[in-house]
């Protein structure tokens, strides 16, 4: 495992957001690192696993316990972390945290693949067909709404025309561009 330590000088904000914890049955990991923030300046990355917070073992902490430990730090915050890719490889190979899989491929995106993902989805548009996805049909069965009728052809035609008009509007283009910019910032890459 590629373990490293950083000390962030206070006060908060520290420039990161956590996900996971013992209460979620998953390790505490960095879900967001603010570009240019204190954590980013020290090399902390999205997906990095939190090993300890100010010398306290983070592996057994709930999400709230970790938040409280971080909030308690005022002058400085010392974190010990493990690079996300190394941690996930070990997690899968050892079958920890309830996962019992061997040699399962695990995709950990790097900056190039994140940028490619954004480029590949730039021209994405919602489906206009009448078919429902398999997951939608399963959801309908689970919620007991699978008996409901599909809309009649005339209403469906009007809805489709309205939809096609809407996605060609300047408002849709602004929303799409805003979403792509926001996604690029969240993924920590330049668009």
Image (spheres, helix red, strand yellow):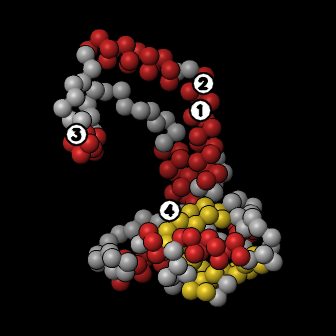
The mark nearer the N terminus, 1 or 3, is 3
Above/below status of 16 relative to 133: below
* Label 2, label 1: how far apart the Cα atoms are: 6 Å
Q: Nearer the viewer, residue 73 or 155?
A: 73
Crowd class of label 2 (few under 14; some 14 to 19; many from 20; radius 10 Å): few
* Label 3, label 4: how far apart the Cα atoms are: 37 Å
Q: Is residue 8 shown left or right of residue 106? A: right
| Rendering coords of residue 140 (x, y %) | 25, 39
Residue for badge 1: 175
Q: Which mark is residue 109?
A: 4
The mark nearer the N terminus, 1 or 4, is 4
| Rendering coords of residue 178 (x, y %) | 63, 38
Mark 2 and mark 3 in contact? Answer it, CB < 8 Å: no
| Rendering coords of residue 11 (x, y %) | 80, 70
Crowd class of label 3 (few under 14; some 14 to 19; many from 20; radius 10 Å): few
Q: Secondary structure at mark 4?
A: loop
Residue for badge 3: 144
Residue for badge 2: 171
Crowd class of label 4 (few under 14; some 14 to 19; many from 20; radius 10 Å): some
């Amino acid at each position: 495992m590629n373990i490293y330590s950083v000390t962030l000088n206070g006060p908060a904000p520290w420039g990161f957001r956590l996900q996971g914890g013992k209460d979620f049955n998953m390790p505490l990991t960095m879900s967001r690192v603010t570009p240019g923030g204190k954590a980013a300046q020290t090399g902390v990355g999205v997906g990095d696993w939190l090993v300890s917070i100010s010398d306290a073992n983070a592996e057994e902490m709930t999400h709230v316990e970790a938040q409280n430990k971080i909030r308690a730090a005022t002058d400085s915050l010392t974190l010990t972390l493990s690079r996300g890719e190394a941690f996930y490889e070990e997690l899968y190979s050892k079958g920890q945290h309830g996962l019992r899989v061997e040699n399962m491929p695990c995709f950990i995106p790097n900056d190039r693949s994140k940028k490619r993902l954004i480029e590949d989805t730039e021209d994405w548009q919602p489906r206009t067909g009448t078919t429902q996805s398999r997951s939608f049909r399963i959801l309908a069965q689970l919620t007991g709404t699978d008996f409901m009728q599909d809309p009649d052809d005339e209403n469906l035609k009007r809805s489709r025309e309205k939809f096609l008009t809407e996605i060609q509007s300047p408002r849709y283009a602004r929303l799409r561009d805003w979403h792509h910019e926001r996604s690029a910032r969240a993924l920590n890459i330049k668009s």
